[in-house]
Amino acid sequence: MDGRVIADRVTGAAETWNDALEIAIRQHGRFLYRIAYSILRNHHDAEDAVQEGFVRALRNRGKLKDVRNCRNWLARIVWRIALDRRKQPVATRTDGLGDAVEQLQSKLANTEEVLVGTEMTKLLDALIAALPEKLRGPLILTAVEELSPGDIAEILGINEAAARSRLFRARQMLRERLSKMMEAKHEI
Amino acid sequence: MKSEDKIERWIDEALRQYGNVDASPGFEVRVLARVKEREVAFRARQRLWWAFGFSAALTTVLLASLGLFHRTHLPDPPVAQRHSDQVMTTKAIPEHRRLPGAETKQEAPTERHARSATSHKQPSGTTSASETPKLDQFPSPTPLSEQEQIMAQYVSAHRQHAVMLARAETDLFERESRERSTQVTGSEGRLSEDKE
């Protein structure tokens, strides 16, 4: 639903804004939940963040008339809430990851098994978490419902070129780190 | 090259995990209920604050207007009353300083004081200018003295005779003053001639 349509409903009578709220939650709730979960990595916290996001959106409903894309506007609110709620900074240490790679190689015989294996997911999770904040954001958002660089730029409040550049650098950094680890273990 | 492709696929797969997460059933209903609940509570709180602010403002305005009304509509105390109070306070002498014989003088009516304040000069150093009563009417209205009362009775009884007497008195006074002025100018002329 377009931001202006929601704005017209939300700023109207109580019954109308209740309807608009329900429509917005049904349309964008799960998308927003995924965004919150990608940062908080906890179901309960993600749900709370979404709830808080809708409350804030309701209180700032006066701004809705200027909003082009309601989904991205809500996503931006939830993104910020999730970042604020992440009390502890993500661990940036990757020292213990080498052992995980070794275990992977010894356990799994072919690449298909690696892809479905939880160990690889954990390893990559740790590597993504170790990325700088600026690069991690765009990378995570591409994974959530495959958002376009334009949408990512709108959510993060940056321009599209910057979003594209950060996305490319994040993938490159991830590739380099993973290949270095694999090579190091091969040499050993 | 092959390993690079492998790594790319791993990254894509790991990222896909981020998008595969889904909320538990009933998520929308839960969020909607809690958001509505919070919004209702917020509005109620807001209404309470508005009511409190409005009542506080109303009370302030009411108090201010009441004060203004009192100030403008209360009658001023009479002038005589104000002065008698002032005289009493300025002339109050401590108990230990009073002389035994001065007791009757202290209890004398304030009327005499008021009259003396207009007609006599205060002895220097005893009272300052701020202590003298400030009168709205000058001279202050006071009852007639004994002599004045006799005079008034005479005027009311023999009005024509009194008028004649008053005219004669005025003429005499004018003549005398004229003579005095001619004497003064004559002596001054003589003095100037002597100098020359």
Image: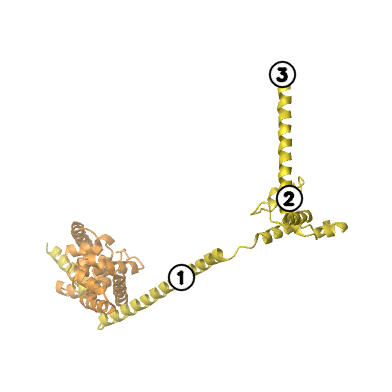
Residue B193's disc is 3
Q: How is the image coloured?
A: by chain
Q: Give the label, 3 or 2, closer to the camera.
A: 2
Is B165 situated above or below A123?
A: above
Report the Cα–Cα distance between label 1 and label 2. 70 Å
Badge 1 sits on which subunit?
B
| Same chain letter for marks 1 and 2 | yes
Determine if residue A119 is in view: no
Q: Secondary structure at mark 3?
A: helix
Mark nearer the viewer, 1 or 2: 2
The residue that disc 2 covers is B162
- Could you tell me which quadrant the N terminus of chain A lies in? bottom left
Amino acid type, callout 1: Leu
> Which image quarter: residue A120?
bottom left
Residue B69, can we see it? yes
Q: Residue furthest right?
A: B100
Q: Nearer the viewer, residue B13 or B100?
A: B100
User: Which residue in the protein does label 1 denote?
Assistant: B58
Q: Residue B40 in the image: state x and y as whole percent.
A: 34, 78
Of pointers 1 and 3, the one earlier in the residue sequence: 1
Chain B takes which shade in the image? yellow
- Chain where mark 2 sits: B
Q: From the viewer's perspective, tell me whether residue A54 is left or right of residue A151.
A: right
Which circle's residue, 1 or 2, is located before the other in the chain?
1
Q: Which chain is orange?
A: A
- Considering only order in the chain, which callout, 2 or 3, is on the residue closer to the N terminus? 2
Chain of the residue under label 3? B
Q: Nearer the viewer, mark 1 or mark 3?
A: 3
In the figure, A125 relative to B176: above or below? below
